[in-house]
Amino acid sequence: MQIKGAVALVTGANRGIGRAYVAALLEAGAAKVYAAARNPAAVADFAAAHPGKVEAIKLDITDHAEIAAAAAKCRDVSLLINNAGINRQAGFVAAGDLASARAEMETNYFGPLAMCRAFAPVLKANGGGAIVNMLSILARVNLPMYGSLCASKAAALSMTQGVRGELAPQGTLVVAIMPGACDTEMEPNFPPPKLAPAEAARAALAGVESGSEEVYPGDMAAGIHQGLAADAKAIEKDLAKYLPQ
Ligand SMILES: NC(=O)c1ccc[n+]([C@@H]2O[C@H](COP(=O)([O-])OP(=O)(O)OC[C@H]3O[C@@H](n4cnc5c(N)ncnc54)[C@H](OP(=O)(O)O)[C@@H]3O)[C@@H](O)[C@H]2O)c1
């Protein structure tokens, strides 16, 4: 699939990697970008700078009525980018209760799943297109300091594989993006080096264009990916040293 001429919808487009996705899509020649945000005023600058090309829409991915309204309105989407996510930075046992684990599953698993379900017929009507699910290298191995975040991303990786199988007959490419730490508000205390949001977004779009099913942007993700292939237990034990604060 080519980005040039595509009509994309990006969730969580107001900041971090979501903003970088909108910029990268425009740079690569997308015909139109729906910049979806819980607060659409936060993407009004993009819409004003690119009239007719960027349209702000209100979308909380945990709100099923808003998802249905977005799918009904954005009938021309050929590239869905499930970018929105949260990290409560919580351990499994150290957390006071299950609230963070449940919230991460709602936003990082059920939200993108509901988006895939709502937009599958739209993508089919537009020739197949592609879905980009913004996961994390932590979908592949648990980091105890962010234990429940990892579980939600692992669930989303399994969902990505299943949706890929279900949508293959309609020609939809389903891509898992699994970066390491990126330089956004999500990881303010994580030590550098961190991947620039623009690099993560560009790597994801290059993956779509090359038909890749898994993309590991940046050195951290690529290193862990290789390490898992060589000795998964060693990587698990290495990450197990990082415990909840
Ligand atoms: N930063 C990293 O190190 C890193 C590494 C690997 C993967 N990722 C993934 O990359 C994606 C983007 O993360 P980021 O680093 O750009 O984080 P960020 O700067 O914290 O931005 C998160 C975005 O998600 C939106 N969001 C959260 N809950 C939402 C909901 N229920 N409905 C709609 N939007 C919602 C936020 O909107 P509000 O402004 O309204 O809160 C914000 O736009 C996430 O899926 C994240 O897990 C990030």
Image (tube, rainbow, N blue to C red):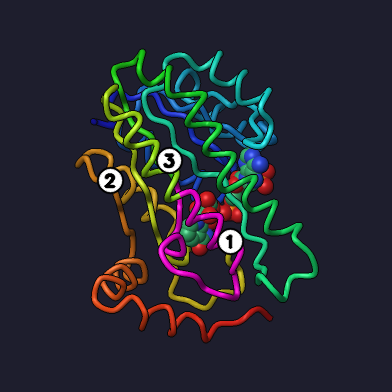
Write down the residue under mark 1: 149
**Residue 153 is inside the magenta segment:** yes
Q: Nearer the viewer, residue 163 or 107?
A: 163
Identify the residue at horizontal 21%, vertical 40% (top origin).
211
Q: Quadrant of the C terminus?
A: bottom right
Q: Earlier in the sequence, mark 3 or mark 1?
A: 3
Q: Amino acid at mark 3?
A: Ala
Q: Quadrant of the N terminus?
A: top left
Disc 1 and disc 2 in contact, CB within 8 angstroms: no
Query: Is disc 2 placed on a helix, strand or loop?
Result: loop
Residue 14: x, y in percent?
59, 41
Query: Is disc 3 placed on a helix, strand or loop?
Result: helix
In the image, which residues are magenta? 134-156
Depicted 166 relative to depicted 161: above or below: above
Write down the residue under mark 3: 23
Identify the residue at horizontal 53%, vertical 39% (top origin).
112
Query: Is disc 1 placed on a helix, strand or loop?
Result: helix
Q: Amino acid at mark 2?
A: Glu
